[in-house]
Amino acid sequence: MDLCFVGGGNMASALIGGLIDGDTPIRSIHVIEPLDAAREVLEEKFSAKAKKHNLRFVVYHADAPDSLVETAESVWVILAVKPQQMRETCEQAPTNLRSLLSRASILSIAAGISIEAITAWCNTSQVVRAMPNTPALIRQGITGLYAPASISEKQRLEVNEIMQSVGQTLWIDDETLLDAVTALSGSGPAYVFLFVEALSRAGVRLGLNPDHALTLTLKTLEGALALIRTSHATPAELREQVTSKGGTTAAALTSLQRAEFSEIVERALKAARDRSAEMSREHYSGRPDLDP
């Protein structure tokens, strides 16, 4: 299969790198990126590497080449532009790209843009949605995927191969649940970064130097995650095992419980989920008088 990325930002770059280094059966990778500086970075980063893997790698300014349009049935177009740019990108695409969008299979990695919207903007029913997260940049991502009934098993397998180039995949049966996936794993790395900031900062305030506080924080998180992965116990059971009655851990957990730690996390995820759903409504109302 051939791939055409519309947008060459960080997530597109992560996918391109994973695909070139992996064993996904692709013939060529095309990128449509309007920014000159971004095109230069992509070419410098991937052209030589793609050549070593016998892959064709080409970056364009705005339109798709005739060769892709002619073989559209075997092409996956990966929409990797910002959600607020998606409608304009699709509806105002140059002639060849517009034709490609209507004939190729489409994989969208934009948060909050529904399949209904992309179907209307691109005049196609061959659309799959993906919600990756930033650890994809080091091929440690997790991607939630949803495909409607119009997508064949072959297409699902192809999407799986594409997204597994940067980590694991998880298929969701209900598109609306992608808002929850966005809230949990899509935005989730930011919560972890914030927790690391808070934990290491608290260590500094207790007297540790910043380097020691950050090292202790990171190794503690890495060790705890490794323990969860290798243990047959649930996270709750592991927490109970390290919490002695009247001990230091119990004192800390009691403080967190009083501050409604679990409720705070749940409210944060609900806020992110609701914002994802709101973005979908903002960018596409589904009303014929407002949308084609």
Image (spheres, rainbow, N blue to C red):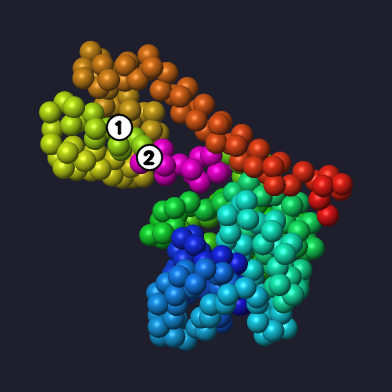
Query: Any mark on residue 198, and which?
Result: 1
Quadrant for the N terminus in the image: bottom right
Which residue is depicted at the point 57% across and 77% down? 60
Which residue is depicted at the point 55% across and 44% down? 182
Q: Is residue 189 visible?
A: yes
Whether 116 is drawn above or below 66: the answer is above
99 or 265: which is nearer to us?
Answer: 99
Whether 249 is drawn above or below 123: the answer is above
Range drawn in magenta: 181-193
Label 1: few (<14), some (14–19) or many (≥20) C-alpha neighbours in 10 Å = few
Q: Is residue 157 left or right of residue 243?
A: right
| Residue 185, image x, y percentages | 49, 44
| Residue 235, image x, y percentages | 38, 33
Which residue is depicted at the point 65% across and 75% down? 63
How many numbered marks appear? 2
Residue 57 falls inside the magenta stretch? no
Name which quarter of the figure residue 229 lies in.
Answer: top left
In the image, farthest residue toward the right: 289
Query: Any mark on residue 18, and which?
Result: none
Q: Is residue 199 left or right of residue 150?
A: left
Q: Assign a secondary structure to mark 1.
A: helix
22 or 35: which is nearer to us?
Answer: 35
Which residue is depicted at the point 37% across and 14% down? 258
Q: Amino acid at mark 2?
A: Val
174 or 210: which is nearer to us?
Answer: 210
Query: Any mark on residue 192, and which?
Result: 2
